[in-house]
Image: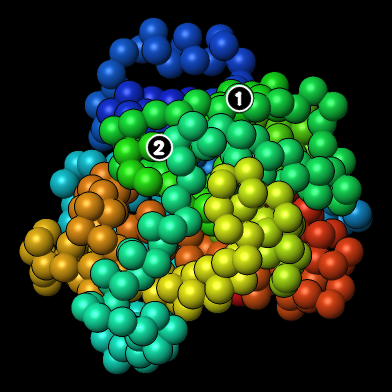
Amino acid sequence: MNRIATSYVKLVLALGQHDPDYVDAYYGPLETRIEVDSQGLRPLAEIRSQAAGLLAELQGQRPDAAGPDAELIRLRYEYLNRQLESLIARIDQLSGQKMTFDEESKALYDAVAPHYDEAHFQKILAQLEAALPGEGPVVDRLDRFRQSFVIQRDRLDAVFRAAIDECRKRTAQHVELPAEESFEIEYVRGKPWSGYNWYKGGYHSLIQVNTDLPIFIDRAIDLACHEGYPGHHVYNALLEKNLVRGRGWPELSVYALFSPQSLIAEGTANFGIEVAFPGPERIAYEREKLFPLAGLDPAQAERYYTVQALAQQLTYAGNEAARRYLDGEITREQAVDWMNKYALYTRDRADQRVRFVERYRSYVINYNWGQDLVKQYVERKGGTPDNPEKRWQIFEELLASPRLPSGLR
């Protein structure tokens, strides 16, 4: 399969010349990048034809492996197969083919997120109404409440570095990290996302934090875990260590953003927060360390996270806004209104989120539906909250494997 895998890598790099967001990371041989670049901008039809040929060739080579590596080889075959299908679907999109939101997420990410109506979110909003007594719409009450938990700009770096250090310490107790792994942090503006991990290879990441809007205290642990430990940084480092270097599988040296790999990447990054900080441990740590470091009142930590847990149940409202907007059922302004009313984003944050949807489209399902699928998979395998060692074991195995979203069901 290595020959097909190497050709797949070249096709991803070639498609990246048409779509600047497509290649999220590449740390394979420099000669491969030079070879692809030297060919110039290849026609989409040509890339698609070659991808279809590779897919047909691969499907004629289904492995019949036995022994201790049988499952991993099967997962590799299925991964390559589905990644090629997703690449073809992305080419079709760029060539003008229209898909519904659900058709797109299935074609690109191997998953379709559940649908929820307004009544589902109204029940959660009613609970928040009760938790945040006062005047005005609940979105305004929630925003006023959260303003007391903003990390001031001059304290931001200290808080984030403390959070990352703690996330790394907790992860290293359970996961054998490469000795050379490292990261750096940058604070940026003008981005449609709140944080991003740029994996550079060699077990090194650049983690960027967007400071366009005020950053609340919960984002310190969320981003430190999600972008760093045990999230994207660890995920990419383990793939490089175990599969690219350990087994010589070239297909994992490139990360196609609009592909099934992203659901696994985002789902594990979000669920990793709960794995690293189960139950009351997060509140205890933040009350003792991060709240004082941020200049916030530690006595308010528990109430903050009680409200935050309720607000978190509204994440699927963002999916619904994206689905309806991209399917042409509502306008951009109505999408902002929906985010404001049901996801409880302030107008500026709702606008930022719609800009994310306009750029990344159905990618939004990878965060919440990805997290739920990963959580269900890990717990079904015995990694329940009352068995933390097993939870870490199953979680690490998932991080270091080419398992597909459909393989989580």
Please identify the quadrant where the C terminus is shown. bottom right
Residue for point 40% across, 37% down: 210
Q: Is residue 257 above or below residue 128?
A: above
Q: Residue 217 at x, y = what percent?
A: 53, 53
Q: Identify the residue position indicated by label 1 in the image.
A: 184
Residue for point 85% across, 27% down: 179
Q: Residue 96 at x, y = what percent?
A: 16, 46
Snapshot quadrant of residue 201? top right
Please identify the quadrant where the N terminus is shown. top right
Circle 2 Cα neighbour tier, 10 Å, few/some/many (<14 / 14–19 / ≥20): some
Q: Of helix, strand and loop, which one carries label 2?
A: strand
Which of the marked residues, 2 or 1, is nearer the chain's N terminus? 1
Task: Identify the amino acid type marked 1.
Answer: Glu
Q: Residue 375 at x, y = what percent?
A: 65, 70
Left or right: residue 121 compared with residue 404? left
Q: Of helix, strand and loop, which one carries label 1?
A: strand
Residue for point 53% across, 68% down: 304
Residue closest to the eye, 324 or 354: 354
Task: Identify the amino acid type marked 2.
Answer: Asn
Q: Identify the residue position indicated by label 2 in the image.
A: 210
Distance, label 2 to label 1, CA atoms, is 14 Å
Circle 1 Cα neighbour tier, 10 Å, few/some/many (<14 / 14–19 / ≥20): few
